[in-house]
Image: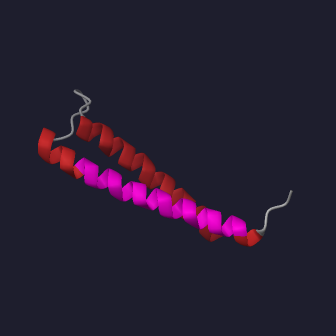
């Protein structure tokens, strides 16, 4: 069943928006956890470090989604 191009475009825009909202939430959670638990530590693998890594990976995913969306 071929998909309608408009429907596909709408789904892709929705995905980019959801990933963007998640990125904002992860950054806010990172800032809050940094204030509560202190600086991120790779050795202790504390909550700020985990949230930083999740935020970093999510921002790269968002970057790739936007680039892919602009190229097509």
In the rendered image, residue 13, in percent from the top left (x then y), is placed at: 58, 67
Q: Is residue 49 magenta?
A: no
The residue depicted at 53 percent of the width and 62 percent of the height is: 16
The answer to which quarter of the image holds residue 69 is: bottom right
Q: Quick check: 62 left or right of 43? A: right
The residue depicted at 19 percent of the width and 49 percent of the height is: 32
Magenta stretch: give its range. 7-30
Closer-to-camera residue (28/40):
28
In the rendered image, residue 30, in percent from the top left (x then y), is placed at: 26, 48
In the rendered image, residue 39, in percent from the top left (x then y), is placed at: 16, 41
**How are the residues colored?**
secondary structure
Can you say whether 32 is above or below 43 in the image? below
Give the number of callouts: 0
Dominant SS in magenta: helix
Closer-to-camera residue (71/62):
62
The answer to which quarter of the image holds residue 44 is: top left
The answer to which quarter of the image holds residue 2 is: bottom right
Q: Is residue 16 magenta?
A: yes
The residue depicted at 27 percent of the width and 55 percent of the height is: 28
User: Can residue 72 be spotted in the picture?
Assistant: no
């Amino acid at each position: 069943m071929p998909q309608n191009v408009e429907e596909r475009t709408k789904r892709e825009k929705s995905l980019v928006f959801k990933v963007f909202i998640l990125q904002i939430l992860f950054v806010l959670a990172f800032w809050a956890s940094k204030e509560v638990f202190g600086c991120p530590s790779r050795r202790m693998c504390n909550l700020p470090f985990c949230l930083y890594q999740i935020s970093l990976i999510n921002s790269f995913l968002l970057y790739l989604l936007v680039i892919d969306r602009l190229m097509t």
